[in-house]
Amino acid sequence: MADAIPFNRQFDAAPGEVVTLTPHLRRITSPNPSMFTFKGTNTYIVGHGKVGVVDPGPVSPEHAAAILGALKASGETVTHIIATHTHNDHSPGIAAIQAATGAPTYGFGPHGVGARRDWPFDSPEGGDKTFNPDHTVPDGGLIEGDGWTLEAIHTPGHISNHLCLALREDNVMLSGDHVMGWSTSIVSPPDGDMTQYMASLRKMLGRNETVYYPGHGGPIENPKPFVQAFIDHRLAREDQIRACLKAGPLTIPAMVATMYADVDPNLHRAAGRSVLSHLLGMWEQGEIACPDTPPGPNSTYSLSQ
């Protein structure tokens, strides 16, 4: 494997606490901790007075009350509600904030809108199929508020409609689940796409924001080396797949048992989805063979001859 990613898992976030991060950015963490959400989903408040709310999180009356209560206490108005993407821990909470404020919603589009493949199998990832933004924001589009500007960067891979959001006034990035400081992202087909994910990581290397604020966990300072470490890590996973298949055809569970031997077995199913995504990309490139067309989670794989 490549050098270890320098994760930072120090994050003491009390649910409902409003934390000031930059002159134009505050954070409130939702009370939905898990092995996939870390300490909970981070909701961001952009601006002051007339504000944007990014990723209100899951359906949670407690979290919605914390967001609305904090803004009411400071006499502020919500003018924009924004989703980085449509997983169930990020966008379903939008409905409660919109019902309370009447503010319009923004996002790249509904669930699945950026997918380039239609594989005939399901993903265990929870997708919010109810969210359809009032305003779709393309790659490079701007969401402009009162004294603040978010530039949308379409970063498919973790999910096809994922946006990172550059807060121009502070030169920082809201990186959603694309780049997180505590863990790598799950890339789960069919909507998750490792080929797109790698391209989106490389896209981030061309950016110059100084700090990333992710959808879960704490900030990532000096983000370019961190993003490069993510790329190197994924390339090393593909080397592991090649090494596994040199011994002959294998299923995904057999590969996961070897590749993730040092990982909590409770995470092996999720790891298998990322291995599948690697395999699909390698199959498209002709490097991997499979008797099934198209290949899937239960297929047997081998190196192409």
Image: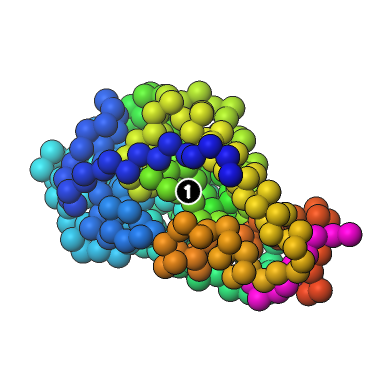
Q: Is residue 218 visible?
A: yes
Which residue is the site of mark 1?
Answer: 184
Numbered range of the magenta stretch: 293-305
How many discs mark residues in the rendered view?
1
Q: Residue furthest right?
A: 305
Using residue 150 as the reference point, say whether residue 61 is left or right of it.
Answer: left
Using residue 184 as the reference point, say whether residue 24 is left or right of it.
Answer: left
Residue 123 locus on image (x, y percent): 55, 70
Q: Is residue 140 visible?
A: no
Query: Mark 1, residues whose alpha carbon is within 10 Å: few (<14), some, or many (≥20)?
Result: some
Taken as a whole, is the magenta stretch helix, strand or loop? loop
**Residue, x 80% and y 60% (percent of image)?**
303
Along the line of sight, which residue is nearer the eye, 12 or 80? 12
Quarter occupied by the C terminus: bottom right
**Residue, x 20% and y 38% (percent of image)?**
19
Q: Is 107 a magenta residue?
A: no
Image height of 258 relative to 20, above or below: below
Quarter occupied by the N terminus: top right
Along the line of sight, which residue is nearer the eye, 183 or 159? 183
Along the line of sight, which residue is nearer the eye, 168 or 267? 267
**Residue, x 81% and y 55% (percent of image)?**
287
Mark 1 residue type: Thr
Image height of 246 relative to 220, above or below: below
Residue 219 locus on image (x, y percent): 35, 35
